Every structure is written in structure tokens, then in C-alpha cells.
Image (cartoon, rainbow, N blue to C red):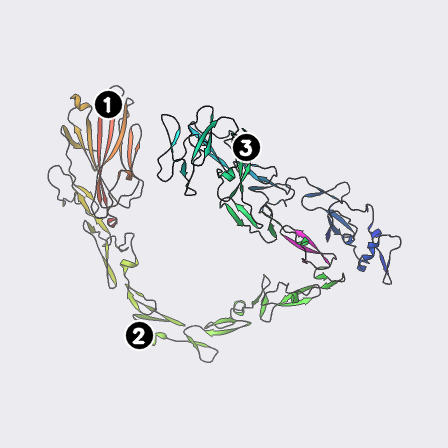
Amino acid sequence: MYRECCVGETKQNITGLTIMDLVTSKKDGLENNEGNNDPTLAEMPSEVENADIDECAVPHNVCSHICINTKTSFVCSCPTGYQLDQNNNRTCKLIETTNQNAMGNCELNNPCEQRCMDNENGSIECKCYDGYRLALNKISCRDIDECIEKLATCATGEMCINTRGGYTCSPQCPASFILDSKTGVCKQAEDPQCQPGYIFSVETKKCEDLNECGLSIDSCEMGERCENTIGSYVCRRERNCGTGYTLDEKTQKCYDNDECALGTHNCLKGYNCLNLQGTFRCNPKPCPPGQKFDRKKADCVDVVCPEGLKPNEVGNCVDIDECKLEGASYCKRHQKCINTKGSYYCRNYVNCPPGYEPTETTGCQDIDECEQGIHKCTNEQQCVNKQGTYFCQCPRGFKHDVPGRCTDVDECFYFPSICSTTSKCVNTIGSYKCECIEGLVSADNDTCTDVDECQYHGICQHSCVNVVGTYFCSCNKGYQLQDDKKSCEDIDECTQFPSRNGGGGVCTGHCINVPGSYKCDCPNGFRLKPDSRQCEDINECTEQSAQCPAGDSVCFNIRGGFKCPLVRCPDGFVRINSSGQNSIRCKRISLDCPECRKGLISRTYNFLSFASTVTVPAPLFSMTGSRLIDKFYTWSMELVSSRALKPGVVPAQLDNFSLEKSRDYSRVTLVKRIEGPQDVVLKLSMNVSSYFKGYEGVAESRIYLYITDQELIF
């Protein structure tokens, strides 16, 4: 037990005083105070005889802050923010920290205007955001005027405009003004909405006075001072009054400009203008108790504090000292109220054993946990009170569970053979019963016999199989049981085993369901394999079933069909066999003519076919030049044509492809899928140069891409 005393030194010096000096004895019901002049000792409880003395309960202020009672003695302690004086081990000294009016916990107490930082010693420290500095009160933050303090970095021709927490650099001429190239002075642009000398405000949606002097767009001469007027300005003989002051022509004295009264301030909504000598300040509007100014909303918002906290004058949550509230009685007469962060607790003056509580007469009595409802018994348990404790008991047929709850004794679990093999054990609350398994009946309420359900006509559509206790129906091949477990329905292999392209999974082509089975069919351009399930592409070119026009056309097989691209070599070129399987090359016959040397060197025709669902990125074509050190190359790619073969198909674009280039190598890669079916033609050019001959010509590759529809993927 401990007792919290007053802050500071005790008025009486009791150093070296033993506990026996503070204890009185009791004889015949009378207090004996001989040899002791302290009248407060007569208020000691009489129960101290033959028991440990609670020195903390003796009203002598043995500790300056917190007294902790121990067996035959006591020790002193200090609250957060204080430390024990090592000279006497009784008094507490304040730990020097910043913001001593705070609780030292930013989560529960935050007096700061912007940022709150927890220190290791339990105190707090206020900090500001970028663009602000801490005020003298170490709580508020003030905006840094980067323009006045020369901290801004604006480019030449820009002017610095201070904002809260920062600054902006704007063109020398403000909005709605243009720079006169002849005079170098900003002049108002033609604005049909406002009269000359006024400017349209986006915030107020009104025409407001234009401060020509402040924006330096006046036409005053040297030696003259510009003074703004509503809708215009005047030029007066210059006398330097400084910013924020106006010269009185009659008295020739400088008077402060009340920007707040004149309406020339730039305070935003939610801020009040405060006039100062030579300037003004925008202060957040004051908020009523319980509210705090929100800079984002520019308005006062309610401060919602956790339980045990309340808003302070700056709108931050601080602790409520419940023990000091007038008219509040949170603790009983034999208890002392101890305030904590966000809460409080009641500490007894008298130490009672566990399970007992102090009485009004400083005695101890048993706590009836059952009656007061402070026990931990669950609803299914019964609370039984005992002296100093209680216990929870379970009714008959139940047992205590590990968490302290009552659970039914499952006889079926603990005694698996309690029922016969033809019956099942059913646990009940506090007992159990034996029931025949499904398909068995009890003739004498003791034994269970099997029932042959298959003897009943029509119980199954196809076949019935009887087993002990039940039966089941089976279906012929190609059929399956319905949900009623009796009827049989045809298995639609085409829909039950779908493939990735939407057709039957049992077929790579088109699946046709038939009663009890299925058959496969292939689309045009395909035929069934010997397994009668898979489709294979017909190569019309090799089987010579393709009908391509005679002449320069070539046959190129694609999935489900073929193409007959026309390959004509340019004049002066001859068609030769290429190393690639799907490639044709045109080579120049002679390079002797001067105009031939810097023209087209060669042209290849390359043919590729792939499905629209190909995985991207997918390399399509590569081109390599000579590795001689005197050769160097430049590469280019262009889309020659893209032709959709079905309505709704989006034609390919050049950005569907990427061209990777190096010194003597290039590669075309498909980076975005192309819808099919459609035909695409690309042209890849390799410009050849050498250090000795200069530009030598260009080698060209025509790439024919045939993209097939997804439906043709098997």
C-alpha cells in the first residue's frame, strides 16, 4: 500500500524517528499518549496492535510525494517528472524539462500547434513544419516570410509571393496583366468583366480594386511615390514613409495604413486581420471552448478527446484530474483518489488481504464476489462464495473446461462402444441415447436390422445396389446421377469438360454431345487426328491443296488456312533462296552503277503467323549486319499496312511493336497483343555505312504478320 502526500518538504523533521515513536498503545479502550505531544496520533486506528503498521497512513507526511508501505517499514517514491532527493530519500525534486505544463505524452496530451515530439525523460517538445518556426511560447508556430528574409530562390523576371509555410514564384506580371514590350511595364489585359483599375477575384467572384502601386504597374516618374486609390492611383512627391505607411500631404507626417480597415489585406477565409504598425497579421479566428482551428478547413472544428481527457485552451487534449473536480465523489471514505493519465483509481488507507475489503470502521470484511457480480464464472457455472474467495462449480453431467467453463460430458466420445455397431451414439445434455443408423430399424428397441431398399420398384432409374444400412443408385456409362441420387442424366462431355477456348475439353475442335457419349469435329482448315479427339492443322501448301495465283505469289501456311502473298523483286534485283524457312530474298544483280551503291542493297520477305493470345513480349524478327569494324549501321521501323479481316477488330499500330537496336544487331518484339484475324506488314531498314566509303545503301526486310483468331487455338 502506498500514500501520495503533498509536493515539497514536510513541515516536521522526523528523520531518525522509529515506527515505535509514532505508534500509540491501547489499554482498556483508552488511548495512551504519554511521552508524545502529537495530538494526531490519537486518530490512529486501534487495529495496529499486533499487526504491521502502515506508516503511510500516519498523518505525519513521512514522504513528500508517494509513500509505499512495506513489512515493518516504508519507502518514498516520486511521480513522473520528479526524482528523489538523495540527501534525505524523502523529498522530490522537479526534473528540468521543456513544457512543464504538459503531461509528457503526445498521445494523451498535445499542447503543440503543429508537431509534438516525445522525449526520453517523459516530457514533450513542440516542433514546426517546414516553412514555420517555433514562437517564444514554445508551443505556437509562426510563418517564415521567405521573401522578406531573402530565403526564396526565384528566377530573374519572377517575383516572390509569401504563402503560409512556403512561397511561390510568379511571373513579374500578375494574372490578367500583360507586359508592355515597349515600356517594360505591366498593363491590364482587356477584361470585359471589370472596369479599368479593378481585377476579377477568383475567390470572391467579384471585381476588386487593383493595387497598381503594389504590383509596380504605375506610371509615376522618378521622385514621385505611387499611392493606391480605389479604382486608380495617384503620384505624389516622394517622401519615404516605408511600406505600410502613407504620407499626409498637409502635415507631411507618415501614418500607418490600416490594411484591415481598407480591405487591402490578403487574409483568407477563417482568418482575422490584425493591424500592426506598418503591416498586418492574419490570425486564425478564435474558437470557443471545446473547438480547435483546422487550417485545412479554415474553420473551428469540435475536439473529440478520449475518455478522461478534455480540450485545453489551444484545443489539445489534456488530462482531467477527477480527484480535484468539485462535487465529485469517486472514492469511498476509507479510500483516497489518485489521479492518473486519462483516468484515476481509489487506494485504500487500510491493507486488507485478497478477497477482503475495508469497512467504514477501518476493519476488513469478506467480499461476496458472487453477490457483487465481480466473479469470473460463466453463465453455465454456479458461483459459490467463501471467506476471502469463491469458486465456480458445474452442474451434474458437466465438467470444467480448460478456460474455466462448464462443458457437457460426451459419453459417446469417452465410451465409443457404449452403443452397438448397428446404431450410433447421440450425445444429449447430461446424458446420451442410441439410435439405429439410416437404413436400419429397431424391432425390439434394442437391436437394429437392415432394410433392403432395392426391393422397392423404381427406386433407381438404372441400377440399385443395396448395402448394410443404406443403398445407392448407379448409372450406365455416359450418364451420371442427378441431385436426387436416383435419376440418371446424360453427361454432356462438351460442357462438363470445357477447354480454354470455350469448346469441349475432350475435343480440341468442336465437341458434339450425343446420348451417353460425344464426338469431335474440326473447323475448316483442320482435320481429326487418329485419336478422333484432337485437331491438327492442314498444311495446304505442302499438300498442294492451296490455290494461289500463278506468277510471283507464294504459298504460306497459317493455322486453319493459308496465305498467298505477292513477292515481286524491284527492277535490277533477282529472287534467290533464303536461309530461313519462311523467307524470300531479293538481291541486286550488279553494284557497279554509282547510283546503285547508295540505294537499296537487298530486300527480304519474311512471313510469320501467330495467335492473338500470344504471350507478350514476344520476339518476332531479328536482323544482323556485318561485324567488320569499319561498318556501322542505323535502324528504322515503320508500319506499312494493317488490315482487319473481321468487323470490330482494332487494326494494329506501330506502338504494338518495339525495336531494340545495337551497333550491328536489331530485333523487333511484340509488346502489345494484336486482335485477330488481321494481316500486318512491317518494314525494317538497315542503313549501311563505313568509315572508308561513307554511306553504302540500305538493306530492307518486309515482315508479313498473319494474326489468327483465338477460336483457332488448339
Disc 2 marks a residue whose amino acid type is: Gly
CA gap between label 1 and label 3 equals 81 Å
Task: Give yes or no for residue 327 being in the magenta stretch.
Answer: yes
Find out whether the residues at labels 1 and 2 contact each other: C-beta distance under 8 Å.
no
From the image, tell me which residue sits under label 2: 458
**For the residues carrying marks 1 and 3, which lies nearer the camera in this image?**
3
What span is colored magenta in the figure? 326-350
**For the residues carrying marks 3 and 2, which lies nearer the camera in this image?**
3
How packed mark 3 is, by other alpha carbons closer than 10 Å (few <14, some 14-19, many 20 or more), is some
**Residue 50, can we see it?**
no
Q: Position of residue 708 (x, y in %)?
A: 23, 46
Q: Position of residue 303 (x, y in %)?
A: 55, 50
Q: Residue furthest right?
A: 34
What residue do we see at 62% from left, 51% from top?
A: 342
Quarter where residue 625 is shown: top left
| Residue in the foreground of this view, choosing between 119 and 264 | 264
From the viewer's perspective, is residue 346 above or below residue 455?
above
Q: Earlier in the sequence, mark 1 or mark 2?
A: 2
